[in-house]
Amino acid sequence: MEISMYEQNLIISFVIDSGGYGVATGGPLAWGLCYNKEMSPSQDYCDDFYKLTYPCAPGAAYYGRGAIPIYWNYNYGAAGEALKVDLLSHPEYIEQNATLAFQAAIWRWMTPIKKGQPSAHDAFVGNWKPTKNDTLSKRYPGFGSTMNLLYGDSVCGKGDVDEMNVIISHYQYYLDLMGIGREQAGPHDVLTCAEQELFNPPSSPAASSS
């Protein structure tokens, strides 16, 4: 697998953003990789719809963990199958093993959540060809759709919110550092997911994140 410098920058921006920096000296672009898990999860992210294929283990919680956080029992189960680790029974392995945390992040980047959807990689590099419904939903190949696929309703489809803008700022910051130029990020409707309909709407009012 060959990853361009442009795509490497994108992955770095997601990894850094996932690390936590709220009160860091120097502002939100100065720090990252401070935390390897969601610090104040609001739920255990157990979806009973998948109880036959990826049943939740007693006492396990499937909140965000890893370099690019994964959420929900079905994602832990699928990642565990791909990486040959029992993440469904032991989701905590991702926060305990740095190598596994980055392996899970690459899996998350390269793997579609559902059949018929693009991976974040394909949405970014242009392998994905949007359908008419995607276009009507304002989903286009580029950075905005990768946020939609990775973070869902935690940042997308909510207008011009800070959570989304901080991720975009990280992306542009690293474009500048690598000498690529932020103009390569594309026009506003490609860069943002503010008005996009979600690829994976939450199944209940309490559900969030893809």
Image (cartoon, rainbow, N blue to C red):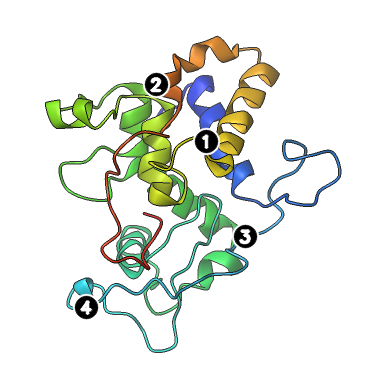
Rendered view: 122 above or below 22: above
Q: Please name the residue that numbered disc 2 is placed on.
A: 189
Tag 1–tag 2 contact (CB < 8 Å):
no
Disc with the residue nearer the chain's start (4 vs 3):
3
Residue count near mark 4 (Cα–Cα under 10 Å), binned few <14, some 14–19, many ≥20 = few
Which residue is at a point 21% across and 50% down the rendered structure image? 114
Kindly report the distance in space between the C-alpha atoms of the residues bearing marks 1 and 2.
20 Å
Residue count near mark 2 (Cα–Cα under 10 Å), binned few <14, some 14–19, many ≥20 = some
Kindly report the distance in space between the C-alpha atoms of the residues bearing marks 2 and 3.
31 Å
Tag 4–tag 3 contact (CB < 8 Å):
no
Q: Residue 129 in the image: x percent, y percent?
A: 20, 24
Which residue is at a point 27% across and 50% down the rendered structure image? 200
Kindly report the distance in space between the C-alpha atoms of the residues bearing marks 3 and 1.
16 Å
Q: Please name the residue that numbered disc 4 is placed on.
A: 51
Secondary structure, mark 3, is loop
From the viewer's side, name the closer residue of 163 and 151.
163
Rendered view: 80 above or below 192: below
Rendered view: 86 above or below 30: below
Give left or right: position of 177 versus 74: right
Which residue is at a point 52% across and 65% down the rendered structure image? 94
- Residue 30 sits in quarter: top right
- Residue 169 sits in quarter: top right
Q: Please name the residue that numbered disc 1 is placed on.
A: 11
Disc with the residue nearer the chain's start (2 vs 3):
3
Q: Residue 140 in the image: x percent, y percent?
A: 30, 25
From the viewer's side, name the closer residue of 59 and 163.
163
Q: Please name the residue that numbered disc 3 is placed on.
A: 36
Kindly report the distance in space between the C-alpha atoms of the residues bearing marks 4 and 3.
27 Å
Which residue is at a point 13% across and 26% down the rendered structure image? 132
Tell me the kind of residue under disc 3.
Answer: Asn
Residue count near mark 3 (Cα–Cα under 10 Å), binned few <14, some 14–19, many ≥20 = many
Tell me the kind of residue under disc 1.
Answer: Ile
